C-alpha cells in the first residue's frame, strides 16, 4: 500500500518551460488536492478535485491547470513556468469522511 | 476566510522534557476540525492528532495531546517526554465542516530537540 505517490521528486525548469506533476493514490479516495509550500507561509491550496471528473480552484490557482484523469490520478500542469512558481508541491487525498488529508512526499520545483 | 496563526516560528526543547506549540484560528463557524501535522526533514507530512470542534474532550495520541479552547479559538499541541525524532516543522490546520475541501494551514513552528 503506497498511499500517495508523486513524480518527480525534484525538477529544475527554465522560465517559460512547461511540465506536468503527477500524483496517484491507492486508497480509493474521492477527493484529491494540490498544494504549494513556500517558506513562512505554510501550505496553500492550488486546486482540488472532489470527485472523478470535477475540479475546482483553491486559494492560489493562477498559472496552473489540473486534470483528474481517473479516481486514482490527479495531475498539475504548469504551462509557462515563472520564477514565482519555485516551491515545494504536495499532492494529498482524503476519503469519504473528509477528516484528515494524506500527503505525498512532495516535489521540489525550481524555476530559473 | 478562516486564518490560522502560529505565533512561534521556532521552539526548542531538551530531550525528555515537555514543550507546547501554540495555534490560534479565526472562524465564525461552530463546526470544524483541527489538526496538527508534523513535517520532518524528509518533507513528508504526517498527521499527529485531530480534534473535532463538537467534542469537549481534548484529543490525545500517546505523547501528544492538545489543549482545545473553543471560545478562545486556541488549539495548542503538547509534546511530552520529547524525543530526538520529534524534531520537525509542525503545522496547525483548520478544516471547515461544511466546506470539506478547504483546509487552511498555519505558517508552521520549527521544533528543535536538544540532546
Image (cartoon, coloured by chain):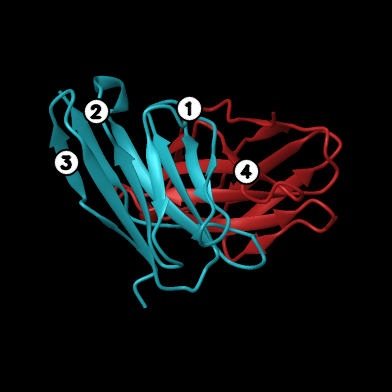
Q: Is residue B13 left or right of residue A80?
A: right
Write the residue at 52% across / 41% down. Answer: B91
Element assignment for label 4: loop
Question: Quick one: which residue is furthest to the bottom in this view?
Answer: A1
Which residue is denoted by mark 2 in the rendering? A81
Disc 3 to disc 4, how far (Cα)? 28 Å
Chain B tint as drawn: red
Which residue is denoted by mark 3 in the rendering? A11
Chain on which label 1 sits: B
Chain on which label 2 sits: A
Which residue is denoted by mark 4 in the rendering? B102
**What is the crowding at mark 2: few (fewer than 14 residues within 10 Å), some, or many (at least 20)?**
many
- Front residue of B1 and B45: B1
Residue B74 occupies quadrant: top right
Q: Is residue B59 left or right of residue A3?
A: right
Element assignment for label 2: loop
Residue B112 visible in the picture: no
Chain A tint as drawn: cyan
Disc 4 to disc 1, how far (Cα)? 24 Å
Write the residue at 29% across / 36% down. Answer: A78
Disc 2 to disc 1, how far (Cα)? 30 Å
Are the residues tagged 3 and 4 within 8 Å (C-beta)?
Answer: no
Chain on which label 4 sits: B
| Vertical placement of residue B16 versus B111, above or below | below
Label 4 vs 1, first from the N-terminus = 1
Are the residues tagged 2 and 1 within 8 Å (C-beta)?
Answer: no
Residue B36 image offset from top left, x and y in percent: 57, 49
Amino acid at each position: 500500500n503506497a498511499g500517495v505517490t508523486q513524480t518527480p521528486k525534484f525538477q529544475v525548469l527554465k522560465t517559460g518551460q512547461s511540465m506536468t506533476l503527477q500524483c496517484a493514490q491507492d486508497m480509493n479516495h474521492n477527493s484529491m488536492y494540490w498544494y504549494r509550500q513556500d517558506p513562512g507561509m505554510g501550505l496553500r491550496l492550488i486546486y482540488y478535485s472532489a470527485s472523478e471528473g470535477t475540479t475546482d480552484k483553491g486559494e492560489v490557482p493562477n498559472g496552473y491547470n489540473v486534470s483528474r484523469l481517473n479516481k486514482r490520478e490527479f495531475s498539475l500542469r504548469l504551462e509557462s513556468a515563472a520564477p514565482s512558481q519555485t516551491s515545494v508541491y504536495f499532492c494529498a487525498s482524503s476519503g469519504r469522511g473528509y477528516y484528515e488529508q494524506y500527503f505525498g512526499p512532495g516535489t521540489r520545483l525550481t524555476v530559473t | 476566510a478562516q486564518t490560522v496563526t502560529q505565533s512561534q516560528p521556532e521552539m526548542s526543547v531538551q530531550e525528555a522534557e515537555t514543550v507546547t506549540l501554540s495555534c490560534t484560528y479565526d472562524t465564525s463557524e461552530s463546526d470544524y476540525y483541527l489538526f496538527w501535522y508534523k513535517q520532518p526533514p524528509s518533507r513528508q507530512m504526517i498527521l499527529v492528532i485531530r480534534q473535532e470542534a463538537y467534542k469537549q474532550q481534548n484529543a490525545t495520541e500517546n505523547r501528544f495531546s492538545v489543549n482545545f479552547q473553543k471560545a478562545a479559538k486556541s488549539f495548542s499541541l503538547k509534546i511530552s517526554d520529547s524525543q530526538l525524532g520529534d524534531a520537525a516543522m509542525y503545522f496547525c490546520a483548520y478544516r471547515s465542516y461544511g466546506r470539506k475541501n478547504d483546509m487552511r494551514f498555519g505558517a508552521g513552528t520549527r521544533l528543535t530537540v536538544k540532546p
